[in-house]
């Protein structure tokens, strides 16, 4: 069943910049899809339109059968509990501990007052500890987030998204700020979450080789248009060159091997 349907989506900013033009694709429940393309291609705009952090100019986005652009504030808040968001720069509260940041993922389920006073149930706290354990952060539970490495911070970001109990994870360049070893750990966790928990993943990536190794499907975006949508195995070096232009030479490496 299609969990996400994007129809004729366009986004034009007030400056006149056309970020997305006539974007059409659908995502099956349980798919792991990488969106590739150069900086400025429209990848981040696309993810932010899906959870309506950005308003679309035209077109439709359906998440679990719900038309995102038609929702009022309360309905949108409810829908966003089902959409986990993972950011390049983590978006954590640095002065708070790991477990406090993870529990913030439950705020969408609470009244404003409950959220402000940090009124979490024992069940939520236990769940947070289980997710922290799943992501290998046991030793960091009570550390402030400004004491963590980039890779650890990103795992906290993933844990915060998971405690929402989402159906889909939108990951906006989740490894762009990380070294190769930390990046591999993050991608392995995302793939594990996708496979073992059945959570659909839509991941913006700049690194072609990573996209080819981890994804069920790759969507290539160039200048706000989809120019490739298919299996990782079927994308050619010519198509990668077309998507990335002069950058492509630095990006096509280690494309062999798949995580299946």
Image (cartoon, helix red, strand yellow):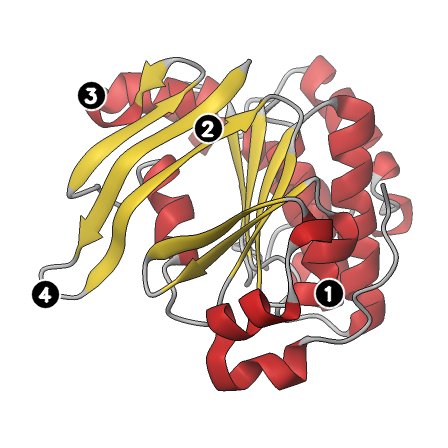
The residues tagged by marks 3 and 1 sit, at their Cα atoms, a distance apart of 38 Å
**Residue 213 location, x and y as percent?**
78, 54
Which comes before the other along the chain, label 4 or label 3? 4
Residue behind mark 3: 70
Please name which of the two marks, 3 or 1, marks the residue nearer to the observer: 1
Give the number of the mark in front: 4 or 3: 4
Dot label at residue 115:
2
Question: Helix, strand, or loop for circle 2?
Answer: helix
**Secondary structure under the numbered disc 4 in the rendered image:** loop
Q: Nearer the viewer, mark 1 or mark 4?
A: 1
Number of the front mark, 2 or 4: 4
In front of the other: 102 or 208: 208
Q: In terms of sequence position, does the residue under pointer 2 or pointer 3 come before the other?
A: 3
Residue 12 located left or right of residue 110: left
Q: Which mark is residue 209?
A: 1
Q: Which residue is mark 4?
A: 16
- Cα distance between the residues tagged 4 and 3: 24 Å
- Mark 1 and mark 4 residues within 8 Å of each other at the beta carbon: no
Contact flag, marks 3 and 1 (Cβ < 8 Å):
no
Asked if disc 2 and disc 1 are in contact, CB closer than 8 Å, the reply is no
| Horizontal and vertical percent position of residue 237 | 64, 70
Q: Residue at x 28, y 53 (%)?
A: 20
Q: Residues within 10 Å of mark 3 (few under 14, many from 20)?
A: few
Please, is residue 156 above or below residue 77 in the view? below
> What residue do we see at 65% from left, 15% from top?
121
* Crowd band around label 1 with a 10 angstrom C-alpha radius: few (<14), some (14–19), many (20+): some
């Amino acid at each position: 069943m299609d969990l996400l349907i994007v129809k004729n989506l366009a986004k034009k900013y007030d400056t006149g910049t056309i970020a997305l033009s006539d974007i059409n694709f659908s995502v099956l429940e349980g798919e792991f899809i990488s969106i590739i393309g150069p900086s400025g291609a429209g990848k981040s705009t696309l993810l932010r339109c899906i959870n309506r952090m950005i308003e679309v100019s035209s077109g439709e986005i359906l998440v679990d059968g719900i038309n995102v652009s038609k929702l009022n504030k309360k309905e949108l808040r409810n829908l966003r509990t089902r959409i986990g968001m993972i950011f390049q720069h983590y978006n954590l509260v640095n002065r708070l501990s790991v477990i406090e940041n993870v529990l913030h993922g439950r705020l969408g389920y609470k009244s404003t007052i409950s959220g402000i006073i940090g009124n979490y149930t024992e069940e939520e706290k236990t769940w947070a500890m289980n997710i922290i354990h799943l992501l290998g952060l046991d030793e960091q539970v009570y550390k402030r987030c400004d004491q963590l490495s980039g890779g650890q911070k990103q795992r906290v970001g993933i844990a915060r998204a998971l405690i929402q109990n989402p159906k889909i994870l939108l990951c906006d360049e989740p490894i762009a700020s990380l070294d190769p070893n930390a990046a591999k750990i993050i991608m392995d966790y995302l793939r594990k979450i996708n496979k073992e928990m059945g959570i659909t993943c839509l991941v913006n990536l700049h690194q072609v080789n990573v996209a080819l190794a981890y994804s069920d499907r790759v969507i290539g975006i160039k200048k706000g248009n989809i120019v490739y949508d298919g299996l990782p195995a079927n994308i050619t070096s010519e198509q990668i060159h077309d998507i990335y232009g002069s950058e492509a030479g630095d990006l096509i490496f280690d494309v062999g091997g798949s995580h299946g």
